[in-house]
Amino acid sequence: MDESPSHMKRKQPEENSEGKEDAPAQDSLSKKRNLSRTCVHEVAVPSRYSASKDESVHGTLLDPIFNGKRAKTYPFKLDPFQEVSVACLERNESVLVSAHTSAGKTAVAEYVIAMAFRDKQRVLYTSPLKALSNQKYRELSQEFSDVGLMTGDVTISPNASCLVMTTEILRGMLYRGSEVLKEVAWVIFDEIHYMKDRERGVVWEESIIFLPPAIKMIFLSATMSNATEFAEWICNIHKQPCHVVYTDFRPTPLQHYVFPVGGSGLYLVVDENEQFREDNFLKLQDTFVKQNLADGNNSGNGRARFAKGGTASGGSDIYKIVKMIMERKFQPVIIFCFSRRECEEHAMSMSKLDFNTQEEKEVVDQVFKNAILCLNEEDRCLPAIEQMLPLLLRGIAVHHSGLLPMVKELVELLFQEGLVKALFATETFAMGLNMPAKTVVFTSVKKWDGDSHRCIGSGEYIQMSGRAGRRGKDERGICIIMVDEKMEMNILKDMVLGKPAPLVSTFRLSYYSILNLLSRAEGQLTAEHVIRNSFHQFQYEKALPDIGKKVSKLEEEAAVLDASGEAEITEYHKLQLEMAQVEKKMMAEMMRPERVLYFLQSGRLVKIREGGTDWGWGVVVHVVKKPLAALGSLPAALASSRGSSYIVDTLLHCSFGSNDNGSRPKQRPPRPGEKGEMHVVPVELPLISALSKLRIAVPSDLRPTESRQSVLLAVQELEKRFQQGFPKLNPMKDMGIEEPEVVELVNQIEELEQKLLSHPLHKSQDENQIRNFHRKSELNHEIQQLKFKMRDSQLQKFRVELRNRSRVLKKLGHIDADGVVQLKGRAACLIDTGDELLVTELMFNGTFNDLDHHQVAALASCFIPGDKSGKIDVPALLVKPLQQLQDSARRIAEIQRECGLEVHVEEYVEAAVRPYLMNVIHLWSEGKSFQVVTEETDILEGSIVRLVRRLDEFLNQLKSAAHAVGEADLENKFATASGSLRRGIMFANSLYL
């Protein structure tokens, strides 16, 4: 960064702070609420910035106030954070508002819209999802008259003064230099914390970087721990002040209870003053001890609960909790489940409960009938719609991404009107529009994240628990956590009282971005500019001074260490390194599957090393053959860079730390003195660094914690017996390997062992001298690593990647040798819904030419990401085109590898080509009914509708691409394919519009 922003800070005074000593005694809840009504205001200011504002009206940068006529008034008194935000906006300066769900961020967004209307300017409101954009459009339309909507599906009043849109639409406008932007004064980025989304976070970063400096921004975010860093980035790239208004204030305080599955009663673990109640936690732990004693050796109840995350007896437990909530008048309640199937099962198990009066039932029935009027006669009788009415009439509902959009919206509207009292929802309900409840229930503290079952992180818990407590209605919100096994106190504490997650950049280079930037290579719109100005690069450079300080500290420590007799020690150290290298080669030979699999029986002790992390000795449970793609890249599985088709499920001593984004618990070996737990971890074969001769007995059921801990005790007992280290398998004597290269390695190891044993230092008494030398070697190594990190700029890494991606584009004919965008590149520039390289390949190699429009729609569906299915039914006429698509994907993956990019060919093909709904799309395009097409797949109705709508968007992008390169026949074919989809329930109007 050429200019670092200066940074100021103040704390907003507490409300009602005058005369505190004379105030009458209040209960602890109201005291807490008064003390909490505070906010922190900070501002990042570019160097040499001077604000020409009338201080009597606007205050100062450090202390903004507003004494002028307001653009909008409210029927309630604004909270301190809202007052400060309004003052910053009236200064015409960018603001990041970071506050809990339901704290009132929307009031700030409405103020900036009112300001734009007053000043005859335009304002854009962006949200991460189409569904949220629809909801926000409805909400703003009720408040303001001149509001429009632009998503991939719908365009309403595109010339309105306030335009609601998805962030993808904004990025497209910026790339294409839309005229609209010349009239825009403000852009509101809602849910900006979505920027850390791995797939789509880059859309936010690019949009922010490309916005003209004249446009001011307002960012609305859930609480995050590095809001100041984000504001400094905005200040740095746009050379304008950016304020941070941060509050921890919850309008309605929360109480957090734990319900032990299979037990009875609730235990208050965190009260409304955010105090952890250790006494209650210990009582809770006692209930599990009693349950285990009651279960005895029975493998039934306790183990079933552990295996199914509470669902074995959870149904009755959830029934019990919901019934109790209704009896105590704690409704409405949101019950968060971590799978769509669980949501539906739990809702259906409430058949004996009815929460609506006769009058409410009549209203629900009327709303339901009005809602389905927008559907065709035949679609109104669909099971997915008919099955919902009996539940809704009783005040019970389900909300997840697999529901039909109309049903989901109906549930939201009824919930907002208080006609749904118990809502079973997945965590997606926790983001977006303000739909609070009095009570929130978590059916489990563990969720499946695509790779492993893990505890939910504090960031996720904050987001979901934030739905509890309705402002102005409830004195306090209630959170009930269902726990199905004994839990470490710190894990629960970190989850409930943990800090909000920091916002971490997920910036990446895409071919779509590179081509768009090359086609508009004018002024600052270049890939180099984007990389240099990314939040990713900013965060990296901000960390450099700390790295420099650490290097100086380590160099000082190395300088004072006495390392006399260094030559002798160096020689000894060199022998040790040589020995380690030869042993590594030996392990590589021993670990070849055909040699080692026979010896990896259950109970075998194996040593695991992952990069620089030594996991120590673990115990083999069993070995499975899996494709690499099944592992993913998350810490739940230990994967090596070399890859392996064999996974060794290994019991390892683990602890849990927090990952960079603060939300994903990460397994790691316990630190000295830290209490860990044995867990079964999938380990790739190449990470085994030693095989012991020893084997121990492994319990048949490893689900109970006690079973796994008994294995840990057995390993620790063996370590006491074998203080010189566990005896290792000999490749020749024990494994019977007789190949010459292995025999040679065994001889080398024996020779080096002799040299080490006969070395004077081996039996030297001067341990201090050796220890000093080793420490000095470690320090020098660490210093070199840190210096390399300082030199190895992220900017340089992205430049190398940019060069490699440009080589791919040249090889595929998208750009010429001078980087000028060619015909193929002009087509790819317009496609961001599917794989732009792959689809342009099909357009230009003639694959689409021989297909009719139904087949075009079916083949194009392979590009749209969505749910997987075990049922793949490819229409006969599309078998060959599908093969051409997979061959093209394989070729593109191989070209990317040749050009220096890390691409796993088969993984790329699997991710790029998704043939799960080809038959469904083909039948729908031909005019079959929704009932017929849904019977052809196990994918849920809502997921099908979502995919078809994205497919329609994709086909329209292909139509534009064909038009751009003068392919009139293809353009017509894509338009006809799109038209064949746009009917019936798939494109039923949103209830919000």
Image: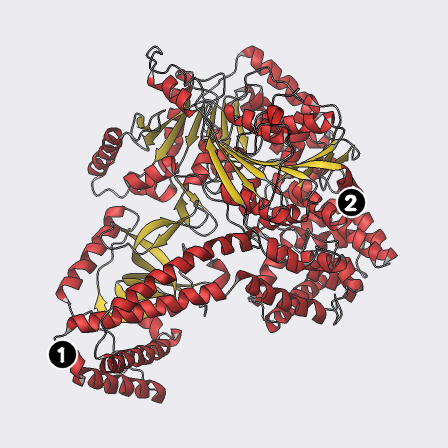
Q: Is residue 634 visible?
A: no
Between 255 and 195, the residue placed more toward the observer is 195
Query: Percent from the top left, x then y, of residue 236?
Result: 58, 48
- The local secondary structure at tag 1 comes to helix
* Residue nearer the viewer, 760 or 60: 60
Quadrant of the image containing the C terminus: top right
Mark 1 nearby-residue class (10 Å; few <14, some 14–19, many ≥20)? few
Estimate the x, y position of residue 842 in percent, counting from the top left: 74, 62
Above or below — where is 823 with respect to 271? below
Q: Is 493 placed left or right of 630 in the picture?
A: left
Residue 133 in view in this figure = yes
Tell me which label, 1 or 2, sits earlier in the chain. 2
Task: Indicate the quadrant containing the N terminus: top left, top right, bottom left or bottom right.
Answer: bottom right
Left or right: where does residue 214 sit relative to residue 417?
Answer: right
**Residue type for callout 1:** Lys
Instruction: Identify the image quadrant of residue 546.
Output: bottom left
- Give the number of the disc on residue 763: 1
Q: Which amino acid does label 2 sit on?
A: Ser
- Helix, strand, or loop for circle 2? loop
Point out which mark residue 183 bears. Answer: none
Q: What residue did someone put label 2 on?
A: 178
Q: Splitting the image into 4 quarters, where does residue 941 fall?
A: top right
Compared with 758, 20 (above or below) is: above
